């Protein structure tokens, strides 16, 4: 078995998937029709053609437009269930799903509708596919900390349905320190804490995620390589990085997958993991990310096994299952 085949066959955890980023164009148009939402694209092909991104913001503009078709609990269920079926085909046995409540509450959708639909899909995934899952509520960093506090307050009646909070959306100009107080409150509530940092932003934002937010994982984090002291600290703490190679390629963080830093991160002793980020927009789900990265970088069987093992080490799965896959 080649390293790429091994990667496709191994059981894995996916830790960095924005569930709104799993909305395929076909489902976007089906939901638009079902809900009477008008889209500024003529059809599936025209929408796909718009997926020529130059940076993070050029993607986010289309991603938020795509999410506008989600109105009812069943829409959130259908979206997540479609993801779980694809994850199952890729040998994902545990998934931690980011969701962006503010994208929906801003359009008048109740947060209970969002969490209710996602939670029901998580239950189905366990019952029908044997996939365990967790939800992670993300605050949009281009909005204010006050709005993040209001979102947290609105989510508290559903506290038992999410295990942690994250920070996503436009990185540049929105350092982690902007959200220090709301993350402190989340930690007091016993929530896990993760944050996007060092995707487009500088190493200082990764330091900020560690020191100001006390992030347990860094989402992306690839720019840590610009700062050797930071790499040493991430290795010392064994802070996981949830890396998303095809996302990095599509958002022009790297020019070519052969230049992707994944191998350098592993060589530096970091707990790097492979993830799909927004698979409907970036050209592939988890196995596509694994296979293309393994082939582009010539990763070995040992490195593939380390990546799969890291995904469980870095997960918020129950301790017994975590130990079984280490
Ligand atoms: N929201 C969805 N995908 C994202 C990404 N790659 N970075 C920041 N925010 C996001
Ligand atoms: Zn992301």
Image: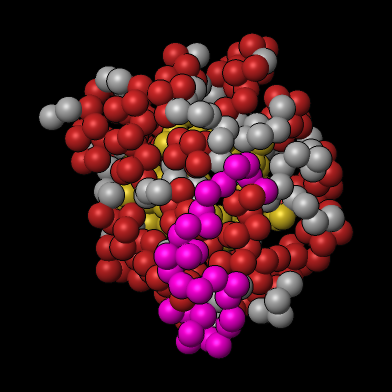
Residue 150 location, quadrant: bottom right
Q: Is residue 33 magenta?
A: yes
Quarter in which the N terminus is drawn:
top left
Question: Between 298 and 152, which is closer to the camera in this rendering?
Answer: 298
Q: Is residue 39 magenta?
A: yes
Q: Position of residue 307 (x, y in %)?
A: 37, 30
Question: Between 281 and 313, which is closer to the camera in this rendering?
Answer: 281
The answer to whether 134 is drawn above or below residue 289 in the figure is below
The answer to whether 173 is drawn above or below residue 40 in the figure is above
The magenta region covers: 30-57
Taking 320 as reference, is 11 left or right?
left
Residue 116 appears in the picture as rendered = no
Taking 30 as reference, is 169 left or right?
right
Q: Residue at x 52, y 49 (%)?
A: 52
Q: Residue at x 58, y 83 (%)?
A: 37
Taking 209 as reference, is 117 left or right?
left
Residue 246 appears in the picture as rendered = yes
Q: Position of residue 196 (x, y in %)?
A: 64, 41
Q: Residue at x 72, y 55 (%)?
A: 140
């Amino acid at each position: 078995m080649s390293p790429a085949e091994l990667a496709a066959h191994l059981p894995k955890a996916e830790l960095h998937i924005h569930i709104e980023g799993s909305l395929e164009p076909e489902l976007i148009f089906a939901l638009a029709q079902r809900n009477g939402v008008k889209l500024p694209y003529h059809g599936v092909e025209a929408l796909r053609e718009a997926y020529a991104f130059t940076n993070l913001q050029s993607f986010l503009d289309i991603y938020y437009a795509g999410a506008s078709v989600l109105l009812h609990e069943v829409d959130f269920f259908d979206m997540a269930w479609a993801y779980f079926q694809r994850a199952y085909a890729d040998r994902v046995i545990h998934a931690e799903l980011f969701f962006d409540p503010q994208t929906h509450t801003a359009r008048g959708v109740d947060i209970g509708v969002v969490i209710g639909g996602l939670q029901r899909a998580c239950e189905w995934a366990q019952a029908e596919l044997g996939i365990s899952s967790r939800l992670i509520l993300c605050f949009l960093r281009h909005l204010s900390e006050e709005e993040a506090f209001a979102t947290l307050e609105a989510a508290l009646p559903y506290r038992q349905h999410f295990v942690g909070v994250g920070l996503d959306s436009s990185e540049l100009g929105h350092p982690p320190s902007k959200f220090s107080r709301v993350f402190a409150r989340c930690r007091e509530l016993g929530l896990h804490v993760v944050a996007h940092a060092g995707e487009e932003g500088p190493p200082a934002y990764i330091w900020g995620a560690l020191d100001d937010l006390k992030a347990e994982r860094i989402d992306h984090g690839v720019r840590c390589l610009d700062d050797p002291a930071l790499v040493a600290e991430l290795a010392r703490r064994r802070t996981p990085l949830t890396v998303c190679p095809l996302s990095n390629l599509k958002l022009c963080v790297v020019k070519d997958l052969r230049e992707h830093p994944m191998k350098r991160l592993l060589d530096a002793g970091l707990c790097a993991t492979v993830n799909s980020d927004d698979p409907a927009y970036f050209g592939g789900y988890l196995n596509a990310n694994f296979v293309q990265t393994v082939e582009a970088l010539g990763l070995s069987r040992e490195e593939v096994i380390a990546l799969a093992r890291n995904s469980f080490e870095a997960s918020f799965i129950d301790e017994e299952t975590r130990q079984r896959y280490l």
